[in-house]
Image (cartoon, helix red, strand yellow):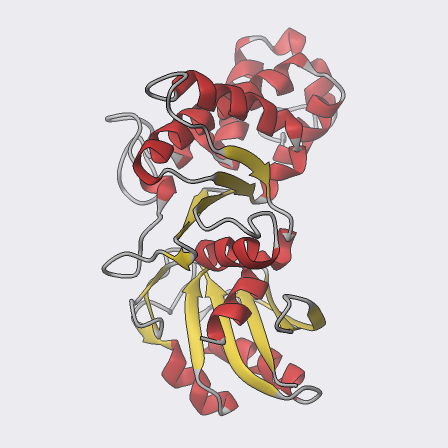
Amino acid sequence: MAYSIGVDVGGTKVLGGVVDADGNVLAHARRETPIQGGVELTQAIADVARELMDDFAIESVGISAAGFVSSDRKTMLATPNIAGWNGVNLDRELSALIGLSVVIENDANAAAWGEARFGAGRGEDHLMLLTIGTGIGGGIVVDGELYRGAFGIAAEFGHMRVVPEGHLCGCGARGCFEQYASGNALLRHAREAVSASPEVARNLLSLGDGTVAGMTGKHITDAAREGDAVALAAFNTTAQWLGAGIASLSVLLDPACVIIGGGVIDAGEILLAPTRAAVERYMPFAGKHPTPRIIAAQLGNEAGLVGAADLARG
């Protein structure tokens, strides 16, 4: 049997896996992500692929990476968080190193496909994935196919403007969705609440170094699980924005389900329950417009790897 390799390029690690036709990951290989990016990162991906190719008959290789990918899935058009990869034809460079053609996919698109084929969205032909982490990524499946748009860069949900002249975003615009409903936004909501009423935030602050600056997303999640009012309020504020955004997207795309992935989903129903309530509240044509199921991703950190491997099969 021939297998496919999926490689997920993250900020700290390059994680590869051999994936069978049923989405099972049979073996892993990893390297640290070179901070200089560029040719060193391309070499690290090749090293991961070659290590896996030593033990399996591999027919295809898929790469999942954050950034804009060309419509032919060969070139990284722009990679805001990876140095030295803008405009790089990864298919050409990696093919020369490993001897196999390579398919490149945006990381959120790859994760959406992985969840659609083998995870929480299995059996659904119309779905959206939102990855809630430092920012917000997205993927769309329509009629059972991944939707990329005319230029290959559809579903950048995080940069949908929700507040005119709002918070400055890393993309250069103001008021982007991810400034209000991401993991970074959760931190900001919590820090604002703590700064306003530090006397009620002693429990939350005690989980870190006692300062607002030392507070992390994990601290907020842990405190929320213990019933901390400030942490729960921060999640509720984040969920209100997330639910409002999902309601707007649902009017446009009419998905059967919306899958929530990324680091913030570790909070589970602490995030999902108020998000569902917010979707109901903010949905236009209240009570008449069908509401999609809001569910947690199932594949975790392997969603992008599995999705990229499956997409590379063609």
Image quadrant where one finds the C terminus: bottom left
Does residue 38 appear in this view?
A: no
Give the mark count: 0
* Residue shown at 58% from the left, 76% from the top: 5
Q: Is residue 96 visible?
A: yes
State the image quarter where residue 286 is shown.
Answer: top left
- Which of the pair 110/314 is nearer the observer? 314
Residue 166 position, x and y percent, is: 30, 26
> How far across and down, in percent of the image, does residue 35 sit?
51, 64
| Residue nearer the viewer, 53 or 145 | 145
Task: Indicate whether 231 appears above or below 162.
Answer: above
Q: Is residue 26 above or below residue 268?
A: below
- Residue located 37% across and 84% down the image: 92
Is 41 placed above or below 56 here? above
Which residue occupies 45% across, 28% down?
A: 291
Q: Which residue extends farthest right?
A: 226
Give the left or right position of residue 86, taking residue 32 as reference: left
Q: Position of residue 183 (x, y in %)?
A: 53, 36
Q: Is residue 38 left or right of residue 149?
A: right
What residue is shown at x 61% (from left), y 72% (from top)? 21
Q: Quadrant of the N terminus?
A: bottom right
Residue 105: percent from the left, percent from the top? 42, 65
